Amino acid sequence: MEDPGFWLHRMVLQHNGIEPIPVPVDDDGLDVAALADSGCDDGAGHSGPPIADRCGAVGCAAHRAGAMGKGGARGHRGRLRRRIPLQPCARRCAGGYRADRVVYVGSTSKTPAPGLRIGWMVFPANLVGPVALSKGLADTGSSVMDQIAFAKLLTTGRFDRHLRQMRRRYLLRRNALLRALARYLPEATVLGAAAGVHLTVRFPDGFPIGELVDRAARMRVRVEPLAPCYAESGSAPPGLMLGYANLTESQIVRGVCALARAAG
């Protein structure tokens, strides 16, 4: 699993008795060479979406295809997300990559709303039956009405219109956050401006990030430190993840102003 990576994914694996082997990331995402040297010769490789490493790397299709190729050569089951066609990647991968070892996962959490708990998984044919059985035993099924409503959004074209509208809104909010950070927290370095709906903000080495998080919380500003995203939290640089998806531009500016006061 990527290190840093989404802390919740790590918790889910650990809850199910799996201790993931951390693999570092570089500017393009999962470090393919480090994956090959990880010693995980017969296991599962978890590759999250471009925003999942939380360190600002956007990731690229060629890099991910390389990771899939390494996994296929060693017998890994790859997990790939976010608009990278599986079969074309499989054909490009070296090392005897097997297309029947990839599971494509997606959800509605970053499009309509996090509260719409709908997701999907695209499996090789030999895994459909066992996974469908496990899903049924886990929760006896998902909300039918939610699925019907979402299907209606898709078939009427409203979902595409919603995405176009939200892209414009997110761009304005991201730019407002970038401007506010440059003005009120100039000592911070911003990463990941092109990935997801959050920014990664790094502070100088030695900065007391825990104190900043606590002071901001007392000012009713909730921010998340980078530490939980690292397999060894002590190795995390001082930094924050700042989400902007559900905030207005004025709220973003007020929040950054509060952060600046807390940092001072």
Image: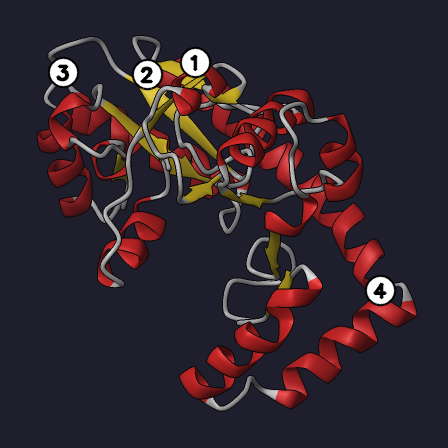
Residue marked by disc 3: 207
Residues at circles 4 and 3 in contact by the CB criterion of under 8 Å? no
Q: How busy is the neighbourhood of tag 3: few (under 14 within 10 Å), some, or many (20 plus)?
A: some
Q: What residue type is labelled 2?
A: Leu
Q: Earlier in the sequence, mark 4 or mark 3?
A: 4
Labels 2, 4: front one: 4
Residue marked by disc 2: 185
Where is residue 159 drawn, in percent x and y?
A: 79, 61
Q: State left or right for residue 238 relative to residue 197.
A: left
Q: Which of marks 3 and 2 is nearer the N terminus?
A: 2
**Residue furthest toward the right?**
156
Q: Earlier in the sequence, mark 2 or mark 4?
A: 4
Q: Quadrant of residue 11?
A: bottom left
Secondary structure at numbered mark 1: helix
In front: 50, or 111? 50
- Distance of mark 1 from mark 4, alpha carbons? 36 Å
Q: In which quarter of the image is residue 96?
A: top right
In front: 60, or 69? 69
Q: Which of marks 3 and 1 is nearer the N terminus?
A: 1
Residue 182 circle label: 1
Secondary structure at numbered mark 3: loop
Where is residue 157 drawn, in percent x and y?
A: 89, 63
Q: Which amino acid does label 3 sit on?
A: Phe
- Distance of mark 3 from mark 1, alpha carbons? 18 Å
Residues at circles 2 and 1 in contact by the CB criterion of under 8 Å? yes
Where is residue 74 drawn, in percent x and y?
A: 49, 33
Where is residue 236 drawn, in percent x and y?
A: 21, 24
Secondary structure at numbered mark 2: loop
- Distance of mark 3 from mark 2, alpha carbons? 13 Å
Residue marked by disc 4: 158
Q: Which amino acid does label 1 sit on?
A: Ala
Residue at 23% x, 55% y is 14
